[in-house]
Image (tube, grey):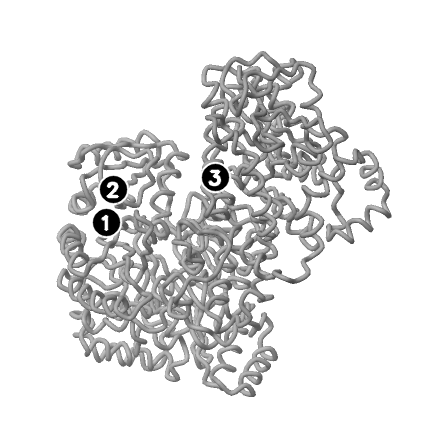
């Protein structure tokens, strides 16, 4: 539709007819241009229906204007079927409920937008579950699963989604309400006659294999198969009717499970072994090779593995079945795991493969397109050998993994989808691979559907007559070709609408170096392939991503949503004002820069860096928000307070209500927030005032301490928060580090001249002036607000000051996790042209890492107390907490810290307009963990933001681990 008048009429017609939201704005359209495939189509608008009446009304309006309709759930489709050029129906906003659950009948009634995990959570207390479980179970919807006939890792036991569907409620494109089921129930007029006239073709035209997903499942209409209209509807990819409700079967979940991890030399060996294990009745037979497994993964030795799960009424029964499988398998090595937590850790490796596989070991991009072919399980080994040969013939690489027990292989291949020759090779390879799959008796799709990726090739699998029958069936259900045109029948070419074609052909001029993406910002944005792990509504364990999505439930405020908007900004077709885009700015506004996506996203999207980059360009030469000046330049203001020794005055003024309100309004600070108190004595002033200061040696290698340390020299970083707001943390760290026998020094305040490292003193007026301008700083507040020019200046000055330290072997101990993360990652990526930044990054150690590496024989005081609190989001994402866990265990601090983000996140939670989201983030993990903590628990919070959030929202004092240990040393704990 190109006529603006008709477009307005369509929009207004939908708004008049539909009670749900109708959004034809740039943001809504940009968020739905893509799914998890290689394809991109720009819709006219998005409708979020509230019920079946809304669906019927939307279809009626769209039919009047001849506008196609695409039903969409979680948008995790691999083949492009969740994209379209007309109106997208988003079922995740309103039609997302579990309507009922009957434990006796083992059924549930669900709406199409219900996320699978929510159904599993409701069924679990009854000992039940929904059988199919794709790796996207935390964000895929039941409607999408029915549309694709999804499977998952347990399909060898519980089959596909079609095996679990009892009855559907469907609105046809012409508004008819149908209830498809068995015995021709809910069949549209003409379907039965059509099928009964083609019985011979239906009996002979479909390969028999467990993972045949390609095409329409018309053989389900055979009388000997119950003439099951609901089953035949499954896998139709939104092309026949719009699902509004489903009655699904549940299965009895085993009370205990064991996981046998079987190691083989390569994936071909694993594939050849998989079929032989099925006779033992496993719940899963999943395979993956070493190139998709993190180096630190705790797996038995080998080059490929089968994950074989068994169940039982008891742990012993499940283990016995797993050990039987191990004995029956010819393996290099094996491991049987019954601990649920360790099983979850191992399964995460497999589930993350859909993202991990998007990068080759050398960092080269890899793409879907041939993500889920399936062959008879007994032929899987032979197929894989031929598949590897075909890859080699075309000079391509891929890492197969997937559902080996069902003969279904997932793989991402390093196609060049950016150039004409590369796209031509993609087509040639696709055609030859389709022929190879058919030669092995397989299905072009074994899980994710055909969509645009494979539908063009269906004649190679089914022949032209069967494909013509598919078209006739489509005509019965959808005579106007309204639903998802270009999918399954009369398909668009597999090499059209590629999402990469609209991106700039040359690298964009940017500030950060993007070392993992060849310096190309477009490549960094391309990292998001739509896996949508950021859309999970709950997290377990230490995970962080994506707190703003969990707080708002809005795609716009997910990592994927922001990446989509950045993609469209670079494309310039839908978002037309580039770096000045208000749509991108508004989506990034609620990004906490927690960096959770950097570690939790399977493809390593780093939205915090992208946000800083965007803000840098967006506000170049323009007035910034007040908060960028007030909090983005916090080191400047706090430095001024320290030099003038006016902390008392500042704190006094901040305690006067009217003055505080004015200050917050001028500084862009949320009215609900209290302004933190500035310390009366800075950390470095306390350091200089220590009575027992000994300067030993000369030159860059010497340092200051209390004279007691005889161990290694460590340089303690006086970050802005420790220096001005929490000097007690720095004092405690000095106490503990010196008790561990280490010599503590501070960074220099004057450049060279042979002065000791970190003497922190300047006696002459000239040197005082220099020292005032020469404090080290990681630039965190400038980075988080996108003031990258300031950040560069600050970091270069810091590197100048740190040169004497870099000339030694001394580690740099950073107490504030966000500052440590900035030095370890942001600084070298921003100053990618300065090798000193990488040198400093390599020296950065957390407090616990320092004790682990430089005082390995020191034993901390034992407290024997439980702990609660939260692992700092930057610690989780960048630094890791292995050393912290070890130190806590050695100190007798028991229990686990929660994941998530505290919600304050530096300046974020203080900024005007962010308070409610900030509180919601804290309520997600941190505050419930503290409320539920046992009596006497130590509340740990290494980050100043985390401690401030706890104090302001819960009235609880959180402490840095250094403070807890120092108090124990002094007998105060």
Q: Relative to 679, does residue 887 appear above or below in the rendering?
A: above
What kind of element bears circle 3? helix
Residue 70: image location, x then y, percent: 44, 72
| Tag 1 residue | 404
| Front residue (pair 726, 82) | 726
Mark 2–mark 1 distance (CA, rounded to whole Å): 8 Å
| Front residue (pair 300, 246) | 300
Q: Quadrant of the C terminus?
A: top right
What kind of element bears circle 2? strand
What kind of element bears circle 1? helix
| Residue located 60% across and 55% down the image | 590
Labels 2 and 1: the sequence-earlier one: 2
Q: Quarter of the image holding residue 655?
A: top right
Residue 879: image location, x then y, percent: 48, 36
Labels 3 and 1: the sequence-earlier one: 1
| Tag 2 residue | 306
Could you tell me if the residues under marks 2 and 1 are in contact, i.e. CB atoms within 8 Å? yes
| Residue located 67% across and 26% down the image | 761
Could you tell me if the residues under marks 3 and 1 are in contact, i.e. CB atoms within 8 Å? no
Mark 3–mark 1 distance (CA, rounded to whole Å): 48 Å
| Front residue (pair 724, 884) | 724
Query: Does residue 21 show up?
Result: yes
The local crowd at label 2, few if under 14, some if 14 to 19, many if 20 or more residues have their Cα within 10 Å, is many
Give the left or right position of residue 602, taking residue 326 as reference.
right
Mark 3–mark 2 distance (CA, rounded to whole Å): 45 Å
Report the disc number at residue 836. Answer: 3
The local crowd at label 3, few if under 14, some if 14 to 19, many if 20 or more residues have their Cα within 10 Å, is some
The local crowd at label 1, few if under 14, some if 14 to 19, many if 20 or more residues have their Cα within 10 Å, is many
Could you tell me if the residues under marks 3 and 2 are in contact, i.e. CB atoms within 8 Å? no
| Residue located 28% across and 63% down the image | 213
| Residue located 58% across and 75% down the image | 18
Q: Quarter of the image holding residue 337?
A: top left
């Amino acid at each position: 539709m190109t006529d603006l008048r008709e477009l307005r009429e369509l929009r207004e017609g939908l708004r008049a007819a539909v009670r749900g939201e109708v959004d034809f704005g740039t943001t809504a359209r940009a968020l739905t241009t893509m799914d998890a495939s290689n394809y991109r189509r720009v819709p006219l608008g998005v409708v979020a229906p509230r019920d079946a009446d809304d669906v019927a009304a939307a279809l009626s309006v769209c039919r009047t204007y001849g506008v196609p309709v695409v039903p969409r759930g979680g948008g995790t489709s691999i083949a492009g079927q969740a994209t379209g050029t007309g109106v997208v129906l988003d079922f995740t906003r309103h039609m997302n409920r579990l309507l009922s659950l009957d434990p006796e009948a083992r059924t549930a009634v669900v709406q199409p937008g219900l996320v699978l995990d929510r159904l599993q959570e409701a069924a679990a207390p009854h000992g039940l579950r929904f059988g199919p479980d794709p790796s996207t179970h935390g964000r895929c919807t039941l409607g999408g699963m029915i549309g694709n006939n999804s499977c998952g890792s347990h399909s060898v036991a519980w089959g596909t989604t079609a095996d679990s569907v009892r009855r559907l409620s469907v609105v046809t494109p012409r508004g008819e309400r149908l209830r498809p089921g068995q015995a021709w129930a809910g069949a549209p007029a003409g379907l039965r006659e059509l099928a009964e006239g083609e019985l011979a073709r239906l009996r002979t035209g479909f390969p028999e294999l467990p993972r045949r997903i390609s095409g329409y499942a018309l053989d389900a209409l055979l009388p000997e198969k119950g003439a099951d209209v609901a089953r035949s509807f499954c896998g139709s990819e939104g092309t026949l009717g719009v699902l509004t409700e489903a009655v699904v079967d549940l299965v009895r979940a085993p009370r205990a499970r064991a996981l046998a991890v079987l190691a083989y030399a390569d994936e071909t060996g694993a594939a050849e072994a998989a079929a032989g294990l099925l006779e033992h009745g496993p719940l899963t037979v999943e395979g993956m090779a070493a190139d998709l497994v993190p180096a630190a993964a705790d797996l038995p030795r080998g080059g490929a593995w089968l994950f074989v799960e068994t169940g039982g009424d008891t742990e012993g029964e499940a283990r016995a079945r797993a050990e039987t499988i191990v004995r029956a398998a010819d393996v290099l090595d094996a491991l049987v795991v019954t601990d649920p937590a360790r099983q979850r850790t191992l399964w995460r490796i497999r589930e993350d493969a859909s993202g991990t596989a998007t990068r080759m070991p050398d960092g080269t991009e890899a793409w879907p397109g041939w993500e889920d072919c399936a062959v008879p399980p007994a032929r899987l080994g032979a197929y894989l050998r031929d598949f590897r040969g075909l890859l080699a013939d075309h000079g391509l690489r891929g890492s197969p993994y997937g559902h080996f027990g069902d003969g279904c292989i997932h793989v991402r291949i390093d196609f060049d989808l950016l150039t004409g020759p590369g796209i031509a090779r993609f087509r040639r390879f696709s055609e030859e691979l389709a022929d190879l799959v058919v030669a092995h008796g397989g299905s072009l799709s074994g899980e994710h559907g055909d969509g645009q990726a494979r539908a063009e090739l269906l004649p190679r699998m089914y022949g032209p007559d069967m494909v013509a029958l598919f078209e006739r069936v489509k005509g019965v259900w959808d005579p106007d070709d309204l639903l998802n045109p270009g999918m399954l029948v009369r398909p668009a070419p597999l090499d059209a609408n590629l999402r990469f074609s609209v991106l700039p052909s040359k690298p964009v001029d940017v500030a950060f170096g993007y070392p993992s993406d060849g310096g190309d910002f477009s490549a960094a944005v391309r990292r998001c392939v739509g896996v949508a792990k950021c859309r999970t509504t709950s997290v377990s364990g230490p995970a962080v991503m994506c707190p703003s999505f969990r707080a708002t439930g809005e795609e716009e405020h997910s990592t994927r949503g922001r990446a989509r908007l950045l993609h469209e900004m670079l494309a310039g077709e839908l978002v037309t004002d580039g770096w000045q885009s208000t749509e991108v700015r508004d989506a990034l506004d609620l990004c906490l820069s927690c960096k959770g996506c950097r570690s939790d996203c399977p493809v390593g999207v780093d939205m915090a860096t992208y946000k800083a980059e965007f803000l840098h360009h967006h506000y170049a030469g323009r007035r910034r928000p007040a908060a960028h000046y007030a909090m983005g330049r916090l080191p400047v203001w706090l430095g001024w307070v320290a030099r003038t020794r006016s902390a008392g005055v500042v704190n006094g003024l901040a305690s006067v209500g009217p003055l505080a309100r004015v200050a917050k309004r001028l500084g862009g600070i949320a009215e609900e927030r209290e302004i933190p108190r500035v310390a009366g004595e800075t950390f470095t002033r306390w350091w200089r005032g220590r009575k027992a200061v000994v300067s030993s040696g000369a030159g860059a290698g010497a340092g200051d301490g209390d004279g007691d340390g005889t161990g290694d020299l460590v340089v303690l970083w006086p970050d802005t928060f420790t220096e001005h707001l929490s000097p007690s943390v720095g004092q405690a760290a000095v106490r503990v580090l010196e008790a561990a026998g280490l010599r503590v020094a501070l960074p220099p305040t004057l450049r060279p001249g042979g002065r000791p490292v970190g003497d922190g003193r300047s006696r002459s007026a000239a040197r005082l002036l220099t020292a005032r301008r020469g404090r080290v700083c990681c630039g965190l507040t400038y980075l988080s607000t996108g003031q990258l020019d300031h950040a560069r200046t600050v970091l270069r000055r810091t590197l100048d000051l740190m040169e004497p330290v870099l000339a030694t072997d001394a580690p740099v101990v950073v107490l504030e996790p966000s500052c440590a993360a900035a030095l370890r990652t942001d600084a070298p990526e921003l100053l990618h042209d300065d090798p000193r930044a990488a040198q400093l990054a390599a020296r950065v150690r957390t407090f616990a890492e320092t004790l682990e590496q430089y005082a390995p024989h020191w034993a901390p005081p034992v407290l024997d107390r439980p702990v609660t609190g939260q692992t700092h989001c930057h610690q989780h994402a960048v630094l890791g907490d292995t050393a912290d866990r070890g130190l806590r265990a050695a100190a007798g601090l028991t229990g686990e810290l929660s994941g998530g983000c505290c919600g304050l996140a530096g300046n974020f939670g203080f900024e005007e307009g962010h308070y409610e989201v900030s509180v919601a983030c804290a309520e997600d993990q941190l505050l419930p963990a503290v409320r539920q903590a046992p009596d006497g628990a130590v509340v740990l919070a290494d980050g100043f933001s985390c401690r401030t959030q706890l104090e302001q929202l819960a009235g609880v004092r959180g402490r840095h681990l250094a403070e807890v240990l120092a108090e124990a040393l002094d007998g105060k704990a």
